[in-house]
Image: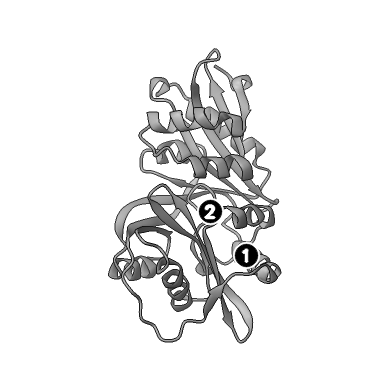
Amino acid sequence: MDTASIARLGIDDLAACLDLAADRRWPRSRRKWSFLLTVGEGFGLREQQRDLAGSVILSRFGPRLAWIGMVLVASRCSGRGLGGMLMRHAMDNAGADTIALHSTAEGMPLYEKLGFRPTGPVHTLRGRFAEHHHGPNRTRPFTYADLDAVLALDAAVTGADRRDLLADYLRFAGHMRVLETDGVITGYAGSWRDGDIVVIGPVLAADLSDATDLIAAVASTVDGDVRLDTEHPALAAWAAAHGIAPWFECTCMIHGEDLPGDRSRLFTPVMQALG
């Protein structure tokens, strides 16, 4: 099998992607895959028109940043170099100064071989939120009148042009809130459902206090478990103290230049596959 076997994946390939995920004991997350295949560029490998042998999704945010996710190879094809082939194809098409991804311990040797370097751990936490008391809450529901301010804030924090992603996210999200400081939007948070869990992300805020206010306001609307992914140890500690317990960890890795923007204000990503 060579790179000529790599083809674009679209929404018509959703069932095959879900089967591939299940083969690797990943959740069959229909909404997540549908969203990623819409906002990103999916690439896949097939063996002689058989079931999907491998996948990768590349999401490009202008010339400064691209994100890679959903790197999967069917168990029957392990050890044949297909993951590296898919990764190199995505990297060749990224067209960005920085390429980033979140890696499990199992995937790190491949990514290091391809020139990626770790930037630090990402803590994933899950649980039912316990009530948060922190004085008056300055958050309120997002309205479309807030869109320009949210887009400007997102560009400043991420250092990338994510307007197309956020336009689709507004239709995908279950709940969105903003936080105002002296009449200026300085933070926002969203959430989306992934099976029986509500993922809280992204969360952008000026500081930890604002981030926890946003998360508490979103989480308090959820009857069930929520999930947070964060590079901020202080946020992970706060979450654990409020019923959202450590679940697992992965590693953020980058290729090329350092991540753009102000990562100190990015408290959770949209999802690990998108940053």
The residue tagged 2 is 275
**Residue 115 in view here:** no
- On-image quarter of the N terminus: top right
At a point 62% along the width and 42% down the height, the residue shown is 38
Q: Position of residue 210 (x, y in %)?
A: 48, 77
Asked whether 272 or 221 is in front, the reply is 221
| Res 199 quadrant in image | bottom left
Residue 78, picture quadrant:
top left
- View extreme (top): residue: 48
Q: Residues within 10 Å of mark 2 (few under 14, many from 20)?
A: many
Q: In this view, does 255 lie to the left or right of 119?
A: right
Assess whether mark 2 and mark 1 are in contact (beta carbons under 8 angstroms).
no
The residue tagged 1 is 154
Q: Position of residue 102 (x, y in %)?
A: 46, 48
* Viewer-side residue, 160 vs 179: 179
Q: Judging from the image, what secondary structure is the residue with disc 2 in?
A: loop
